[in-house]
Each structure stands twice: as structure tokens, then as C-alpha cells.
Image: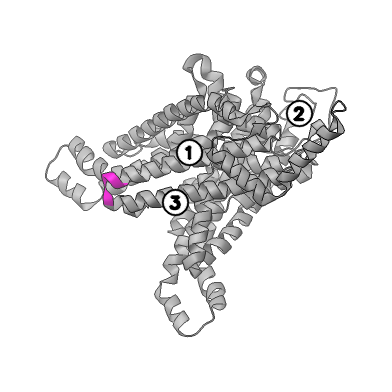
Amino acid sequence: MLPLLLRQARRILLTVLLGGLLGATLVRLGPGFGVDERELDSRLSADSQHAIRVERAKENNIALFYVRYVSGFVHGDFGFSRSLNRPVAELLKERLPLTLKSLGVGVFGGASLGLAFALLTVWWRAPGSDFVPAILSGLCLAAPAAVIALVLFWLSPWIGAASRWAIALVVFPHVYRYAKNQLVATSESPHVVAAEAKGLSSWRVLWAHVLTPAAPQLAALAGISFSLAFGASIPIEVICDSPGVGQLAWRAAMDRDLPLLVTITVLVALMTLVVNSLADLALAAWKPDAGSAAA
Amino acid sequence: MSFKQKFALAVLTVAVAASLGAGFLAQSSYSEQFRDAISAPPSAHFWLGTDELGRDRFARLLYGTRVSLLLAPAAALLSTLIAALIGGAAGFLGGRWERLVTAGVDLFLSLPWLFLLLAVRALLPLNTSPVTSVMITFLLLGCLGWAAPARMIRAGTRTLVSSDFLVQASASGISRWRLFWRHLLPNLRPILLAQFWISIPLFILSEANLGLLGLGVAEPLPSWGAMLRDLENYSAILQNPWMLAPVVLLVTVVSCLQLLLRTEDRAAC
């Protein structure tokens, strides 16, 4: 367990450092870097303008710029949004809770729906038993997240929070297909056939001999689902006009506010990694063999 | 090939043929404006009506299909090639190079796809010509989409490297370069093909998402993503349901690609 914990911590640290380097390089190379509109302000004296140039000159050294960027990041100073004229930390504090709530509800809803349909398909086993979920998952996989959000936004007067439904429908097909394949493979294994031959009830076979052995693999889906949902949150929040981090990232991209966009990207990557690591650690605590295999 | 897959192949063939023959099928150019027929309903001249700028929706749909169906496979080819080189070399060489590549792949995969695309797209000029914007969009998809295929290719390469025929070839004194190009890469073909096919619908959907967000292909060049922006006008759709044609075609084509994908996937396993 401890080596796994250390490995995950090292992985997260490496990602933050590499992501920070990538982010700092992007900000450094981005258009508009090194340009300060204050220099055009005729009210500023020559000394003030010189001070602005000196301050900016420090950022020309990419190594120094990166060290300052990472140091600020570690201390919770995520920089300043030029387009919104506010500190990035403040913007994130405002918007992150809404996104996390949408993601939590959406991922839980999508995963529950996918798992329920997968269980139903395995339990029923009649030809065509997976017709409805297969069509639904196929449609959800073939439609862009933005279109799913649009359709649900139209339906929002009847169904309520469209963004959560949209995230659920983005996650659902992936969970359904993976869970169905896992459960079908387990249900065809010799120990399940033997349990059925002994006359155990179908519910008991499903619960004790199919679902329980496949549970670690299904739990590993949590990390992937969050990563999927984070990605989908951009078009979904934009279409559903939900003021979360996804919408903030889109506004930053449209306004070319790279410091804001890069900080959001690095933070989202960090959160995805943490969720993935937690899933791996939970798996290792539950079933040590599976945990080491997953790592 | 099952009946469903044959049907999917037929639909795709029709879609590709229609998009390639857009010049013959469409009665006007995708950018030609008919100012006396703004937002016109379907007619003999405009099969899917016109948009709010008076452009033929059917022509735009055909040319948009051409853009998406030609450039998404090109981007998929690029990402598969990058993945083959990086993942193949990592699996073949092993050691530090493999660890480095695995860390890089993990980093790329931990960044949600659309966030990464948005960050890099914002770095590039937004006010480019339509042709440049379409190239930038798909080049970006190709260059950033290598991580997941690289992981699969690395795993496939590791399995092949320890196989009997490669061990025997290595023992007979063949150079590592020749071993990689003549013996390893040809045997990775099923995995490469599967990754190529998997990437196409992914890139089509990514372009659609970017287009709907206003970060995809620039006007007046049509693409499925750019055409989906019309869907934001809900009241207009209720009165003009033919505006749904791009989304119907997009979902149909991606579904057909998913249906065909399973054969390739099975071949890769």
C-alpha cells in the first residue's frame, strides 16, 4: 500500500511540474505576452513606464518565469486574469464548487444508469435484452457533448438542471459498455456456471458471483469517468449557461486569456490525477492484487 | 462482416461519395449568398433551404461533410503515426525511454482532451483565413491525439518484443533498426489500424465540439461543427426542422464508424 501511495504522489508531483512547465511555456509563447497596455497611457511618467519595462524584463528569462510561476502556484497564487481583471484564485473559488457539484451528480447519475442497464442485460439474458441501452448508448457516443447539452437545455423546463443530465449522458455509454463487457465475461466464467448448476437463485449468482468479483474493475472506472466529465463540462456549461469552470475556460480561450486558461487546465489535470489516484488506492485497499495490477 | 456492418459501410460510402461530388450535386457554392432568399424553406433549388445569410444549406452540408470526412482521417493518420513512433520506440527500447514516454503519456491523458485543445487553440491565431483555420484545427487534433494510441502501441510492442520470432531474429544478429522496421512494425499493423479507426470518430466529435464553441473552422468554410451553431436558435429549429440535417448526418456517420470499428478492434486483439 505504501509503495503505491508513494508512486501516486510522485506521479502527481511530476505531472504538476511538467504541466506547470508546459503552462508557463504556453503563456510565455502566447500572443500578447510582453505587451502591457499601460505603456500607452500618456498619464504615466517616464519613470513609471521604465519601472513597467523593468518588471516585464524579469519575465523574459523563461527559467526564472517558470520558477516564479510554479512558486506562485504552490502558494495558491494562480496569477491574474487579464480579461476579467480579477485574480484567478478568486474566480476559481467562485466557480469550482458549481462545477464539482455538477460533475459529482452527473458522474454518479451516469454511472448508476450505466451499471443498472448492464446488470439488467446480464440478468435478463434474453435476445434483444440490450436493445434499448445499446441504442441509447450508441446515440450518446455518436453525438457531441455540446449537442447533448443543447437537447437537454431545450428540455430543461421539464427536467431541471440540464448540465447535470448532460454530464450523466456523456458518462453513461462508457460505463454501460465497459460494465456490460466485464459482467458478461464474469458471468460466463466456470465458477458462475457451477453456481448456476448447483441451483443458486439468479439474484444470488448475480450479486455474489458476478458483481462482487467484477467490482474492482468497475471501481477503476471512477477516475476515467471524472476525466471524461471534466472534458465535457466545457461545451455543456457554455451551452447550458452554467457559470462553472468549463464556461470560464471557454471565455478565457475566446478572450485569449492564456494565464487563466493554462492555470485552469493544470488544475483540472491535477484534480483528475487525484481522483484517479484515489480510485487506484481504494482498489488496492479493497483488493491488494487488483490494486498492484492497476498501478 | 455482419449485415449491420455492411449497412454502415454503404451509408459511409454514400456520404463520402456525396461529399466528393458536392460540386455536381449542389446547385451553388457553399459561400454564395442569395439575398432574395434569406432563411428560405426547402425548395427545388435549395433542397434544405437557406441560412440567415442566404446560403444554400444543402451545399454547405455537402462541403462541410467533405471537410470533416477527409480531414478527420488525415488527423487520425497523423496521430497514429506519431503514436507508432513514440509508443513503438518506447516498447522496443524499454528502460529509461519507456519510463519517460509512459510519464509523458500519463501527463497527456490526465489533461482532459477539450481543455488541452482549448489551451493550444487559444495560443494560435483566431483571426486566420478559413483554410488556415481548418488546417490548424485538424493538425492540432492530430498532434494532440497521440497519447492514448501510444499507450496501446507500447503495450502491443512489449508483447511482440518478447515473442519467439523476434527473440530468434535478434539472436541471429539482425540490426535493431532492421528488427524495428522489418519485423516489429509490420506486426503492429492490426493495432495501428484499430487505433486509426478509433481516432476518426473521436476527431469528428472534437471538431464538432470546437466548432459549436466558435473555436473550430472559420466562416465561410463549412464544417459539421460550424453548422451545428445554428442549433442554438431553438425557436428557428421548431419552425425549420430541416436545420437538424447536419446533426442527423453527424450522428449517423459517427454511429456507422462505431459499428465498423468493432471488426478492426477484434482484429487488433
| A73 relative position to A293: left or right | right
Image location (x, y in percent) of residue A289 = 28, 53
- The answer as to whether the residues below labels 1 and 3 share one chain is yes
- Magenta highlight: main SS: helix
Q: Which mark is residue A271?
A: 1
Tell which of B122 and B184 is nearer to you: B122
Q: Residues within 10 Å of mark 2 (few under 14, many from 20)?
A: few
CA gap between label 1 and label 3 equals 15 Å
Tell me the kind of residue under disc 1: Met
Task: Tell which residue pokes out farthest to the bottom in this image.
Answer: B172
Where residue B235 sits: x, y (%)?
65, 17
Foreground mark, 1 or 3, reads 3
Task: Compare marks 1 and 3 and give the one earlier in the sequence.
Answer: 3
Question: Residue at position x 44%, y 56% from top?
Answer: B266
Residue A73 percent coordinates (x, y):
56, 39
> Are both tags, 1 and 2, on one chain?
no
Give me the chain letter of mark 1.
Answer: A
Q: Mark 3 belongs to which amino acid?
A: Arg
Specify the label residue A10 is tagged with: 3
Q: Which residues are magenta?
A: A284-288
Q: Is residue A165 visible?
A: no
Position above or below: B267 against B224: below
Between B72 and A101, the one nearer to me in the picture:
A101
Q: Residues within 10 Å of mark 3 (few under 14, many from 20)?
A: few
Q: Residue furthest left?
A: A198
